[in-house]
Image: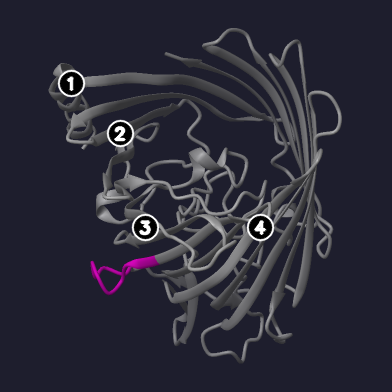
Amino acid sequence: MIRGLFLLWLGLAAVSARADIDLTGQLESEWAYGYEDDVAQKWDFKLTPELRSDLGEGIDLTVRLRARWDAEDRLEPGRPSQDSRATHNRRAFSGSRAELELREFYITTAIGEAFLTLGKQQVVWGKADGLKVLDVVNPQSFREFILDDFDESRIPLWTLNLEVPLQPGWEGGPQDLVAQILWVPDPTAHDIPQDGALYAFTTPRIVPRPPPGVPVRLNDAALPDSLVSDSDWGLRLSAFWAGWDLTLNYLYRYNDIPILFRQLTSQGVEVTPGFRRTHLAGGSFSNAFGNLTVRGELAYTSDVYLPTRNRLDADAVVPVSETATVLGLDWFGFTDTVLSLQIFHSALDDDHAGLYRKQHETSATFLLRRSFWNETLTAEALFIHATEEGDSLSRFKLSHDYSDALELWLGLDIFSGDRNGLFGQFDERDRLVAGLRYGF
């Protein structure tokens, strides 16, 4: 498969050689050292070539590959099963350390006043930092938990993405009104690290613990496989009205987190991961008031299945609905400086007994970013704190644009808190990072 993707790339480059073509890319390497357990977490090298070509007739093509080699092989030891990925959206592996992935492959074209993007792509809803509320169209790779950039950790999906401009039916109505219609016939779900990986989930909020001494059999997950009936569908209305950027969002999808259904047998406990449909409805807003930007998101999600410690529950999961919100304040009043505060809140429809999480949970993030030397040196600190569990993630990064093509950086990621918490489960995964990125 690696050879096939490589030949595909060469073929596209050859076919497009006579057309209007732009071939760019990046070479990146990052090293991470876990100083708590004195181990190199990773030392990877990534080559990301990107081809953009005008195919004529108003059609543009974008192709992006990512070749990655990790000398340490601790983030995804061995070859991942990829059970959570559709067959046509899997990575190709050579041994246990090298992989090749088709990250993007889409065409864009105008259809009348509408704009079509068709193929493998990312669709970004919402603009929250660190945590997500609306940005759930694409599943995510948790290879490095949430430490990787969202653009790199999102898993692109094969998608039909149509944006249609609309005209308001009354004077003084919203401007730039656009309807975005999504059809996603790609059932790929989250990449969850397997047992033995450095960032494998251990918190009972995600992976419930079996009773002591009881053998557990874990069956393979079965992805939905019907092209039409199992597709995800989405609709977003966006507009600018009275100084506000507004969206209304709706997504009918399979939840990307596999649900661990439990069944008691004479041999112990049998766990079968499965996927269920959910409805997401919400919206976002943002406006600038001088140096202050106010923004927010809201998402109501039906049929969220959460694990329970109640041993009388037949399948060990409880269906609930969740309302998630985020309010963000960004301050640009100081020279070359950004201060950002976000408050996230998650509320379940009821206080269900036995759940590993509380009915109401709040998290806060604080971001400080300042640039120096004509914006060639950037210092950044991001703090994420979960108030109920008391665990947190602190991130520090210093990056330098050595030239227009070369970026260097140093970073520090610190987890703290109870090991049952979302961040505290990685309390022994604190790390130092160093990296470089060269664009060509």
Q: Nearer the viewer, residue 164 or 11?
A: 164
- Locate residue 407, reporting x and y percent: 59, 15
Q: Residue at x 37, y 35 (%)?
A: 96
Tag 4 residue: 285
Q: Amino acid at mark 4?
A: Phe
Residue 5 shows in the view = yes
Give the SS element for disc 2: strand
Tag 1 residue: 19
Q: Earlier in the sequence, mark 1 or mark 4?
A: 1
Is the residue under label 3 in contact with that under label 2 (CB below 8 Å)?
Answer: no
Q: Amino acid at mark 2?
A: Thr
- In whole angstroms, how far apart are the C-alphas of marks 1 and 4? 41 Å
Tag 2 residue: 62
Q: Earlier in the sequence, mark 2 or mark 1?
A: 1
Q: Quadrant of residue 10?
A: top left
Q: Earlier in the sequence, mark 2 or mark 3?
A: 2
Q: Which residues are magenta?
A: 224-233
Tag 3 residue: 188
Total numbered labels: 4
Q: Earlier in the sequence, mark 2 or mark 4?
A: 2
- In whole angstroms, how far apart are the C-alphas of marks 2 and 3? 21 Å
- Locate residue 267, reporting x and y percent: 44, 82
Is the residue under label 4 in contact with that under label 2 (CB below 8 Å)?
Answer: no
Q: Residue at x 69, y 41 (%)?
A: 429
Residue neighbourhood size for the residue with mark 3, other residues' Cα within 10 Å, grouped as few (<14), some (14–19), many (≥20): many
Camera-nearest label, 2 or 1: 1
Q: Is residue 116 above or below residue 374?
A: below
Is the residue under label 3 in contact with that under label 1 (CB below 8 Å)?
Answer: no
Residue neighbourhood size for the residue with mark 2, other residues' Cα within 10 Å, grouped as few (<14), some (14–19), many (≥20): some
Q: Earlier in the sequence, mark 1 or mark 3?
A: 1
Camera-nearest label, 2 or 4: 4
